[in-house]
Amino acid sequence: MAKEFNVTAVCIPEKHYMADIRQRLKKIKTLIDNGCYFTINKARQYGKTTTLIALEKYLQKDYYVILLDFQTFGYAEFQSENVFAISFAKSFLHFFEKNKLELTDRLNETISNLKDEIKNRNTDFTLKTLFEELSDICGRTDKPVVLMVDEFHKNNCSHKNIAWTKKGFYKAINIILSEKNTLFESLYGKLAEYPELNSMLYSLLFTGKSITYNPDKPSIDIAAMFGFITNHNGTVSIANRIFETRLYNLYLSTSEMHEQDIF
C-alpha cells in the first residue's frame, strides 16, 4: 500500500509520510538520561502524540516506558482525589500486565499490594499513597521507569471540584485569569518574539476592524499555529474568551504603565 500524507491522527511510519525526528528523539533522550521533567507543548496536529509514541519505542532498550493517555479518562475519573488516584494506578499497572514482565519477588509483592488497594477501593487511597506505591515499584524494577502522559490538558482545571455550579464555574475562571502558568507565559513570549503577531492581536481587540483570515499572511499563520486564533466565517477571531481576557488585561496594563491612549 502506497504511503499517504496524514493530518488527522497519529502518524504510522509504515503508512504515512513523516519527517525524520531521530535527532529530536536523541535530544529528548538526553533530557531523560539527565532525570529532567519536561512538557511538549504545541497546537493541535503538530505531532505531539506521534512524537511520544516514537519516543516510547526509542527508549525501550534502556527504560520501561509507561505512556498514559488522559484522553481515555472521563469526567468520572476526575470527580475526586481518591477516584483519580485509583484510576491512575490501574492505568499504570496495565503496563506490567500487558507486557508480562518477569518480576522479582519483591516487585511482585509491591504490585500485588497496589492491586489490593485498587480492588478494595480504599477511600484512604490518595495521591500521596499513590506516589509512595509507584515510588516503591520504580525502586524495584531492573530498569528505570519513564512515565509519559499524553493529553494532559484534558485535566484542564486543577480546581475542578469547585466548577460544578455557576458560581464555582466563575470562580474557576477567575483563578485561571489571575494565575501565572506556562501557557500564558508562552503566549506573551510569542508576542515579544513576533511583533507583527502582537500588532494584529492588538488591532483585532481595540480597533474593531474585521481581519480576513488569510493563512498565507505570516502573522495569521503564526497565530493559528500556536492556537491563539481561529477562522470564524472567513475572519480572524481570538480562539477563546480566556485568551481574549488575558490579552485585554495585558494591553490595558501596559497602556497604564506607559500612560498612553490605546485607541
Image (spheres, grey):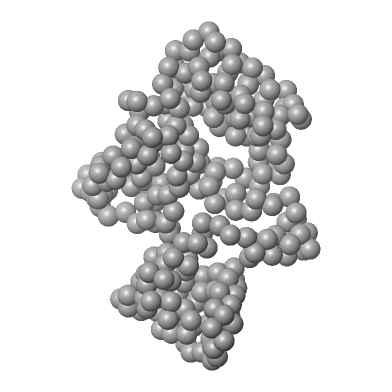
Q: Name the residue: 43% across, 71% down.
A: 191
Quarter of the figure that contains the N terminus: top left
Residue 211 percent across, percent down from the top left: 43, 84
Residue 52 percent across, percent down from the top left: 39, 42
Q: Name the residue: 36% across, 51% down.
A: 47
Residue 256 percent across, percent down from the top left: 59, 82
Q: Name the residue: 56% across, 57% down.
A: 181
Total number of numbered discs in the rendering? 0
Q: Name the residue: 57% across, 50% down.
A: 154
Query: Which residue is most to the left?
Result: 2
Quarter of the figure that contains the C terminus: bottom right
Q: In the rendered image, is residue 98 in sight?
A: yes
Q: In the rendered image, is residue 234 in sight?
A: no
Above or below: residue 246 compared with residue 93: below
Above or below: residue 115 compared with residue 261: above
* Of residues 137 and 3, the one drawn nearer to the viewer in this rendering: 137
